[in-house]
Image (cartoon, rainbow, N blue to C red):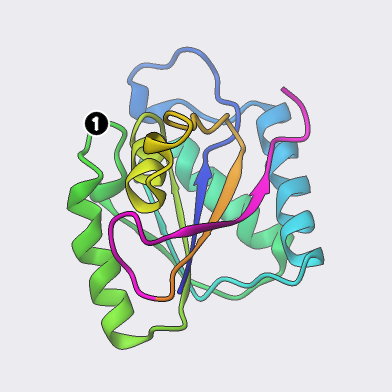
Amino acid sequence: MNIYLLRHGQAVQAAERDSLRSLTPLGAQDIELLARTFVARGHKIDRCFASPYLRAQQTAEIFKKNSELTFAIESSLLLRPDNNPVSLLRLLEDVEETDKESDILLVGHNPFLSELYAMLTQANQVNGIKVLAAGELCGIHFGMLGLGLGSDMLNIPPSRK
């Protein structure tokens, strides 16, 4: 099983509510380039779960369109930025039970994704918690899903910082 963590692209600083912040043109362009790089390297996605926040939904849609992969985008409240990453583990375990070879894309926010990355790879015990930049994608490979059992397999930073 491979799990890809994609932090939403660069977003506008303010909106009526945080959940309504949209991507900037630069944020959208970064995700377009990232998606093309992802497929050019031979990766695939079977399932995608995205935060219901606008910027994450836009990121997932742009990624899907520009990767030319066919997968449904499933909105999940578990990927909101204020959620605890442990709550997402049950969802991942359920997916693994039905298909151990799934490639899953999770589109969300910090600090959630950075904390999830650290839990899945034990990266916080080695180098401290890796903080995913806006528009960054990390891939984690699992022989068997579990806390700390994942190994880094891919990192695509945003094209611009």
Q: Could you say which quadrant of the image residue 110 lies in?
A: top left
Residue 121 is situated, as x and y percent measured from the top left of the image, at 41, 51
Q: Left or right: where does residue 157 sit relative to residue 60?
A: right
Q: Looking at the image, which residue is at 35% across and 75% down?
A: 144
In the image shown, does 71 or 20 lie closer to the viewer?
A: 71
Quadrant, the N terminus:
bottom left
Residue 154 is situated, as x and y percent measured from the top left of the image, at 64, 55
Task: Tell me: residue 155, above or below residue 98.
Answer: above
| Residue hosting label 1 | 82
Q: Amino acid at mark 1?
A: Asp
Quadrant, the C terminus:
top right
Q: Looking at the image, which residue is at 63% across and 72% down?
A: 44
Residue 41 belongs to magenta span: no
Q: Left or right: where does residue 23 sit relative to residue 159?
A: left
Magenta span dominant secondary structure: loop
Q: Left or right: where does residue 145 sit relative to residue 107?
A: left
Q: Looking at the image, which residue is at 75% across and 38% down?
A: 29
Task: Tell me: residue 45, above or below residue 64.
Answer: below
Residue 140 is situated, as x and y percent measured from the top left of the image, at 50, 59
Residue 149 belongs to magenta span: yes
Residue 74 is situated, as x and y percent measured from the top left of the image, at 37, 63
How dense is the environment of label 1, judged by Cα within 10 Å: few (below 14), some, or many (20 and up)?
A: few
In the image shown, does 38 or 140 lie closer to the viewer?
A: 140
Q: Which residues fall within the magenta stretch? A: 144-161
